[in-house]
Image: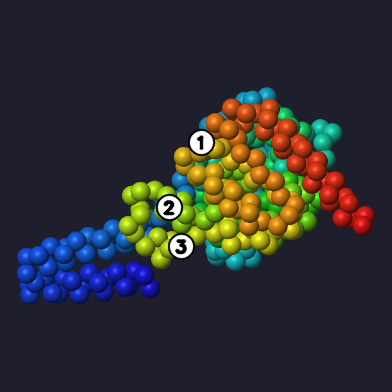
Amino acid sequence: MFTLHLFSLIAMASSADKAMSPLLFAGSLTAIAYAGTCLALYHAQAKLIFRPLPHLMSTPADSGLPYEDVWIPVSQETGADLEAGTLHGWWLPNPGSRQVLLLCHGNYGNISYNLERIRFYYNLGFSVFAFDYRGYGQSTGVGPTEQTTYADAEMAWQCLTAVRQIAPEQITVCGHSMGGAIAIHLATQQPRMANLIVKSSFTAMKDVVKGRAIYRFFPIEQLLTHPFDSLSKVSQLKVPVLYVHGDQDRDVPSFMSEHLYRASPDPKEIWLAKGANHNNIATLLGNAYGETVKAFCSNAWLQSARQSFG
């Protein structure tokens, strides 16, 4: 509908060019250029939002971590698309630990670009399952789109709970940046998970785009087909949630996590990492962040136990 409207504006302006004064003619050209830019943004947005890379730079073995490759068939029952494919992931079992962390990475690269994050959570005592969305790394199939990333996270969840028979109450879901929006969506569908960690994420994609000066003059809400609207979903959460954000984040400002926190029901926590940016929280403040995660997961487990036993 939006595309058809733009074409009609361009056609109307072009047909009237000959009857216009020079000033009106210049205005017509400006309108055509603006409409053309909107049209280009509309069609290019997937490439601007999703930035997958196909080649894995390294594996957990390069960091001395035990792991196994996991392959998950993409079924046509997901409702996200009609073409089958395969998701690729890494399973890092942590001997003696009952805690599992499902990692939803951000919009750039693939799981190998998140190896430091994987190692961080593994060293905290979690068994870790990290996976790539369709179109990222070695995962295949039509995508990525907002809906396919949601479906892919659901399939990763089912791999842990249905295939590996891990109890939902043992699984922490953690999402970074765009992965935070994916993790929030998964938590609204799977309220039995142990808890949720949302790191350096945003209220909605439109808010991120509007924060870029170059896009401020475009009708972003009408153009976006991948809204990733977390703010409208967090009120539905039934799991403990921890929001983590660097207070020097220039990609996604920390006030967005504060907005998500305020809109979320209890139990909830927020931790603003002083001096950290979008990607270096664990590197800059690893000990403090690790203690925050461990304390949160412990408190969430105790609260869940109290609710279970009345």
Q: Quadrant of residue 281?
A: top right
Q: Which residue is mark 1?
A: 248
Q: Quadrant of residue 275?
A: top right
For the point 25% across and 61% down, the residue is 34
Q: Earlier in the sequence, mark 2 or mark 3?
A: 2
Task: Pick whichever, 65 or 15, lies toward us.
Answer: 15
Q: Label 1 vs label 2: CA separation?
A: 18 Å
Q: Amino acid at mark 2?
A: Val
Q: Amino acid at mark 3?
A: Thr
Q: Secondary structure at mark 1?
A: loop
Q: Secondary structure at mark 3?
A: loop
Q: Label for residue 230?
A: none
Check whether the beta carbons of the residues at disc 1 and disc 2 lie within 8 A of each other. Answer: no
Q: Earlier in the sequence, mark 1 or mark 3?
A: 3
For the point 50% across and 45% down, the residue is 252
Q: Position of residue 290 (x, y in %)?
A: 70, 32
Q: Is residue 58 left or right of residue 91?
A: left
Check whether the beta carbons of the residues at disc 2 and disc 3 lie within 8 A of each other. Answer: no
Q: Label for residue 209?
A: 2
Residue with the most extreme right position? 309
Q: Label 2 vs label 3: CA separation?
A: 13 Å
Q: Secondary structure at mark 2?
A: helix
Q: Label for residue 225?
A: 3
| Front tag of 1 and 3 | 1
Task: Pick whichever, 247 or 233, lies toward us.
Answer: 247
Q: Is residue 131 left or right of residue 226?
A: right
For the point 32% across and 73% down, the residue is 4
Crowding at mark 1 (Cα within 10 Å: few <14, some 14-19, many 20+) = some
Q: Position of residue 165 (x, y in %)?
A: 81, 50
Q: Quadrant of residue 147?
A: bottom right
Q: Amino acid at mark 1?
A: Gln
